[in-house]
Image (cartoon, helix red, strand yellow):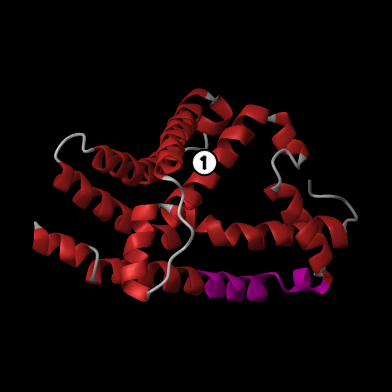
Amino acid sequence: MDDLYGFLIGPALWASLTVFVVGLICRIFYLYGLSRERDKVFYNHMNWSWGLRSVGHWIIPWGSASMRNQPVFTFAFFLFHICLFGVPIFLSAHNVLLNEWVGWSFWSLPDGVADALTIVMLITILFLFARRLIRPEVRILTTPWDYTLLLMTFLPFATGFLAYHQWGPYRLMLILHIIFGEILLVVIPFSKLGHIILWFFSRSFIGFEMGERRGARSW
């Protein structure tokens, strides 16, 4: 078990981080090249002012008409993303490892706050899962892979929570937490989860199209 743990926080972690970063970069360049080839006219009306305004309105809670029309979903949506990024980056246990590897670390959340945010994260994932099952307009667009991605996002947080509280076999929960986290990193660039980066490009492009070309707001 110790050898497996050492492998997971060593070579396996660096490999998954490499796939995550390189995969996202390659996907960005691939989609950009495809866009330049197929949407040449689009680039005649690029205007970063409109693009940034579009992004700005959509990263502010209830900043767009669509979000104001779905206030509960918007609340869960923003909680989900805040916890998804905030907990792994600012978790004290992760920062201890980061400091051991590279000699520096991010500011760390108090353990109680991180624990509460993990619970919030798990609840919002369950909410998003239920929404896909209950809302007809969402269910019809949902594939089994969408449910799988939600599950893959749920598992690293659930196992990390169990390991932290030592509920169940601690070593097993810790190993599963690391494995599920690394699997998620590898999957992100090649799935819809890649929108963590690609969303900013697509939202900017919508701003170019709606604003510069049509003179209309995209929010």
Q: Does dot 1 land on a helix, a strand or a loop?
A: helix
Residue at the image point whose x is 24% and y is 64% from the top: 9
Tell me, yes or no, if residue 22 can be seen here. yes
Q: Is residue 43 left or right of residue 99?
A: right
Quarter of the image for residue 8 reads: bottom left
User: Which residue ends up furthest to the top in the rendered image?
Assistant: 134
Label 1: which residue?
Answer: 80
x%, y% of residue 101? 32, 72
| Identity, as a three-letter code, of the amino acid under mark 1 | Phe
The stretch drawn in magenta includes residue 122: no
User: Which residue ends up furthest to the right in the rendered image?
Assistant: 215
Residue at the image point whose x is 51% and y is 32% from the top: 140
Which range is magenta?
A: 27-44
Quarter of the image for residue 46 reads: bottom right
* Foreground residue among 52 and 45: 52
Number of disc labels: 1
x%, y% of residue 45? 83, 69
Tell me, yes or no, if residue 191 can be seen here. no
User: Which residue ends up furthest to the front in the rendered image?
Assistant: 110
Quick check: 93 above or below 173?
below
x%, y% of residue 83? 49, 44
Quick check: 218 above or below 39?
above
Quick check: 139 above or below 53?
above
* Foreground residue among 127 and 88: 88
x%, y% of residue 217? 84, 50
Quick check: 116 above or below 207?
above
**Within-10-Å neighbours for mark 1: few <14, some 14–19, many 20+:** many
State the quadrant of the N terminus: bottom left
Q: Tell me which secondary structure the magenta stretch mostly adopts.
A: helix
* Foreground residue among 27 and 82: 82
Residue at the image point whose x is 43% and y is 66% from the top: 105
